[in-house]
Every structure is written in C-alpha cells, then in structure tokens.
Amino acid sequence: MRKISLLFFCSAALAAEGQSQLSSNPNIIFILADDVGYGDLSCYGAKAVQTPSVDLLAKKGVRFTHAYACSSTCTPSRYGLLTGQYPWRRNDTGIARGDAPMIIHPDQTTVATMLKNAGYATGVVGKWHLGLGEGGFNRQAWNDSIHPGPAQIGFDYSFIMAATGDRVPCVFVENQRVVGLDRNDPIQVSYTQPFSGEPTGKANPELLTLHPSHGHDQAIINGISRIGYMKGGHAALWNDENIADTITRKAVSFIENNSNHPFFLYFCTQDIHVPRVPHPRFRGKTAMGSRGDAIVEFDWSVSQIVATLRHLGIEKNTLIILSSDNGPVVDDGYRDQAREKLGDHKPWGPLRGGKYSAFEAGTRVPFLVSWPDRIKPGLSEALVSQIDLIATLGKLTGQVLPTGSAPDSFDQLDVWLGKSSANRSFLIEQSTGTLSIVNNRYKYIQPSTGPAMEENTDIELGNSPIPQLYNLKQDENERSNLATKLAKKVNSLSRKLEEAVSKP
Ligand code: NG6
Ligand code: CA
C-alpha cells in the first residue's frame, strides 16, 4: 500500500515538473533562407537592398558575425542542422536530386524528434531538399502517400517543396501527399530520361520565359526549364511567383493552430534560390533585378511571421533563429540579370568565395537569435555553428539526447542567448571540394585537387593542391597563405581535423 502511494506521488510530481518545464519553454522558429550571403541583409551592411523586418530581429536579439552553416550547399547543410552529425560523415549527403530517397533515417534523432519528445508541436514548411520516400524512377510514390518523410523524423506537420525550385517535381507536398493532384493525370519524374512528347529547355528554347545560363535545360514548368524530367501532375504544379505567399501562409497557419502550447516551426524559404521569380508586387523594389527583389520578398515573409506572433500575443516568448543554408551565388544557372544588375552590392560582404566554396563566404552566414523575454540585444563575435542546434535546444528544453545521436553537436545555449562570448572550441566547414577547420581564428584548408574556380558561377572554390592557412582575425578575406611560415600550426590543425574526421 505504502509502496503504491509513493509511486503515485513520484509520478504525479514528475508530471507536474514536466508540465512546468513545458509551459515555461518558448516557442521556437528556425527561419532558414536559401543562398542568402553574409552581405545580403542590411543588418549585415547591405546598402542596395533594405531588410527592415530582419533588421528588427537583429536589433532585438543577438547578431552573430562568426556563425557557420555546416556546408556550402543545401542538402548537406540541412542534414547537419537537423541531425547534429556532420554531413561528410556519410557519403550520400551531397546535393540531392528531386527524386532522391530520404537521406535522414527514421531511426535518427533530429531536432524535430527531440522537441516532439519535449512536448512541442512540430512543423516544417518550405524547401526540404533532404530526399523523400524510397526515391528513384517508378519507385517514388508521387501519386500516393510518400514514406518515409518528415513525419518519420519528428515533424507532426509538413508542407514542403520536395527538393528545390529548380528541380522537378514542381509541386507542394503536404503531410506526404502531393497537393492538388488530379488522379487522372499522375506525376512521373525521371532524372535520367526525357518523356517522349514533353518539351525540354534544350529542344524548345522558344517556349521559355526564363532561359538557363548553364544546366537547367530539361523539363519546362511555367516557361522555366528545370533540372530533371517530369510528366503529368498539371493541376498540382506550383506557380513560381506565388511560392513565397503560399509557404508563408502555411507557416502562419501552423503558428495560429498551435499558439496555445509550445511549438517548433522549421520555416525554409525558397528565396533567394534560383529560379528567382518574386511576386509582381516585389518586382523593381531594388535596382538589382530579381535577386535583389527576392531578398525583399524574403524580408516580407519574415515580417508576416513576426506580425502573427505579435497579433497572437506570443512574440515575447518565441525564440527565433534566422540564418541561411550556405553562401551567396549570383548566376546559379539562369539568365536572370543578377550579374548585370549587381552594381556595387557584395552578397559575400567582406569575405572571399561564395556558395560551393571553401573560402569563408561558402559557409559563414548571417545568424540572428531573438527572444524578447530573455535576450539582451547585442552583437556577438563568438564562433558558432548550426551543427549545435540540436544540443543547444536540447539544453533549453531539458532533453537528454540518446547515446550516439548528434555526435558533433554541443550545447551553446549561453552563447546563442548572448550571455557568453566563448568560442566553439573548433568547427569544420565543408565545401564541394574539401574540408577546413577553424580554431582560435586560424583556418586551415585541406589540400584538394578540385578546380580553383567554378567558371559558370564565377566563384573561387578555395581548392588548392597545397595546404592553406589563414589568420581570419587579421586577414578575413583569406589573401595571405601562412602555411609555409606557420608550419607547426598547419600540423596541429591538420591533425585536429583528421582526428575529428576519424572519430567524432
Ligand atoms: C547545382 C545547380 C544549382 C543549384 C545547386 C543546388 C546546375 C548547373 N547547378 O547543381 O543551380 O540548384 O545545384 O543548390 O544544375 S542548393 O542551394 O540547393 O544546394
Ligand atoms: Ca542553398
């Protein structure tokens, strides 16, 4: 009898504790822009485009100057962000095709599974690009329920673009079913062969309203040729100029539907990835053409999220993290005048390189953390990485991660909330060609045989057959290779990198 009542007492106490932990937990929104560079936002120095809503988050929160994405392209960057495992620990995390199988395994712990366990309502809206279902021609269930998908890695709700704006299928997928599909017009997708009778950008350039500059000459959807071939699904096709409106509306609805208990929203914009087709109301808002206008559209999406929180009275207890998945690119495959109209604007800010690159602009990205109830506004120069999202939010919500999960993620809560300026002890950057390690403001780039320059995008990739060492404190633009002069430093950093690669 005594035993039973004791047990009852304990579980009631635990439940009460869980409850109070939960009710004091903030809502969490991670806003992830696509290809927005270190210098693309006015709070990071841009003059040719104004981003007042993003700037307000920076003003109310902590703005980081040394924050990194896990990789200089999208799929690996997002893989690291959600799992806390560096993407290069696996060999299947490169830029995913639109018919790629789901890359994160359902048995992996993600930020979403962890927060779901903590009692959060979890949702993902926008660009996914992490593979879906079983993948492959004739195996992917585009016309049925697609498994596995976001629900299998912790997201209660999902409204996503399967891959990217420039890859087929050009449809939205809500809770793992294609939205608006007409059963009589099934979707077929192939990344190897065109469908006979279907026009392509290569064969039918006369049908295009936006022409490719490189690649992107396969299926034509809305007058824009894409990567991959697609047939059918006409009623389900998205309208490019409405993507920001559609996904922002879905993000807002998710917040409204979950405003009475803690929620986690992972909101990934298509802006400012190619093809850049901002809604007509944003056209001409900058002198930079569609790339600049897409930044204004991104800022608008942010304004809608914040206005919704304010309207619902939950702005103060909502933690917003805003960042980008990789560095900037000007011409990423379409003749959209981005290069011609760039003017003095520097998407990479004071950094060298860009998307795809081992130089800093590849992975050093804007990073803002705002939580009006708890954060004292400020600027932080601390070395931080998106890889730490899961451990940091685990600490915030009192979650213990299962052994073996998120091996590269460390709790940085005090730093992210601006209470500490301690640097992460070291971090690893991944480019399309090599790995680099940053430690105590020195950066070592591992030798690699890839090209120094990507001609199409006009980006310096940072590949070199000889070791590179830069002092980022004195030489942020990575001009002076100190590898010969500081051979000891090269040795210690290359050893540190090898150690980290061989065992997490
Ligand atoms: C590249 C595409 C580029 C973009 C990128 C992925 C070509 C020539 N280039 O292969 O346009 O789609 O992949 O971008 O096809 S990311 O931001 O999703 O990583
Ligand atoms: Ca990207």
Image (cartoon, rainbow, N blue to C red):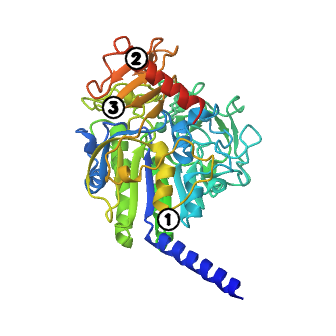
Left or right, 127 with respect to 314, comes to right
Viewer-closest of 114 and 77: 114
Mark 1 touching mark 2, by CB under 8 A? no
Q: Amino acid at mark 1?
A: Phe
Left or right, 472 with respect to 229, comes to left
As displayed, is residue 318 above or below residue 286? below
Q: Which residue is mark 1?
A: 263
Q: Position of residue 399 (x, y in %)?
A: 54, 60
- Report how far apart the C-alphas of labels 1 and 3 lie in the structure: 33 Å
- Report how far apart the C-alphas of labels 1 and 2 lie in the structure: 48 Å
Q: Which residue is mark 2?
A: 488
For discs 1 and 3, the disc positioned in front in the rendered view: 1
**Number of marks in picture:** 3
Which circle's residue, 1 or 2, is located before the other in the chain? 1
Judged from this view, the residue extending furthest toward the right is 138
Q: Which mark is residue 376?
A: none
Judged from this view, the residue extending furthest toward the left is 47
Q: Quadrant of residue 88?
A: top right
Q: Secondary structure at mark 3?
A: loop
Mark 1 touching mark 3, by CB under 8 A? no
Viewer-closest of 106 and 293: 106
Judged from this view, the residue extending furthest toward the front is 2
Q: Which residue is mark 3?
A: 348
Label 2 CA crowd tier, 10 Å (few <14, some 14–19, many 20+): few
Q: Quadrant of residue 419?
A: bottom left
Q: Amino acid at mark 3?
A: Trp
Which circle's residue, 2 or 3, is located before the other in the chain? 3
Q: Residue at x 68, y 50 (%)?
A: 106
Q: Residue at x 28, y 24 (%)?
A: 475
As displayed, is residue 232 above or below residue 463? below
Is any part of residue 335 visible from this angle? Answer: no
Quadrant location of the N terminus in the rendered image? bottom right
